[in-house]
Amino acid sequence: MEYVYAALILNETGEEINEDNITGVLEAAGVDVEESRVKALVAALEDVDIEEAIETAAAAPAAG
């Protein structure tokens, strides 16, 4: 989950979501970074509009 949080932090601060930046955020937080997970996350987020995804998730009804 910390990898996704790193991407959200970068998005919020207007920084590019790339391997170097995600690794930097994770290392600053004291996380043992797995390069393969960073690469997978960057690839998965390549065509994702994070702002739209957040809005869509916030608009989804909660399970009852």
Image: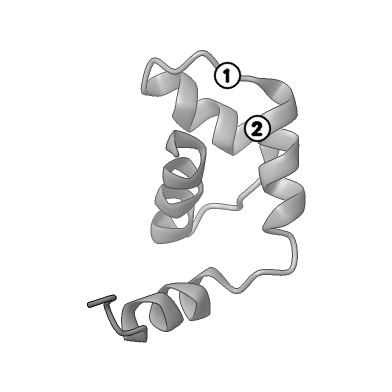
The amino acid beneath tag 2 is Asp
Left or right? Give the position of 13 relative to 45.
left
Quadrant hosting residue 56: bottom left
Between 60 and 42, the one nearer to me in the picture: 60
Seen from this angle, which residue lies furthest left? 64
Q: How many marks?
A: 2
On residue 5, which mark appears?
A: none
Closer to the chain start, of discs 2 and 1, is 2
Left or right? Give the position of 29 relative to 46.
left
The amino acid beneath tag 1 is Val
Residue position marked by numbered label 2 in the rendering: 20
Q: Position of residue 62 (x, y in %)?
A: 27, 77
Between 62 and 56, the one nearer to me in the picture: 62
Residue 38 sits above or below residue 30 on the image: below
| Secondary element at tag 2 | helix
Quadrant hosting residue 1: top left
Q: Position of residue 64 (x, y in %)?
A: 22, 77
Residue position marked by numbered label 1 in the rendering: 33
Q: Residue at x 60, y 74 (%)?
A: 49
Q: Position of residue 22 (x, y in %)?
A: 56, 36
Residue 56 sits above or below residue 36 on the image: below
* 2 or 1: mark nearer the eye: 1
Q: Residue at x 49, y 46 (%)?
A: 4
Q: CA distance from mark 2 to mark 1?
A: 11 Å
Left or right? Give the position of 28 relative to 64.
right
Q: Position of residue 48 (x, y in %)?
A: 66, 69
Disc 2 residue crowd, few under 14, some 14–19, many 20+, Cα 10 Å: few
| Secondary element at tag 1 | loop
Q: Residue at x 74, y 60 (%)?
A: 46
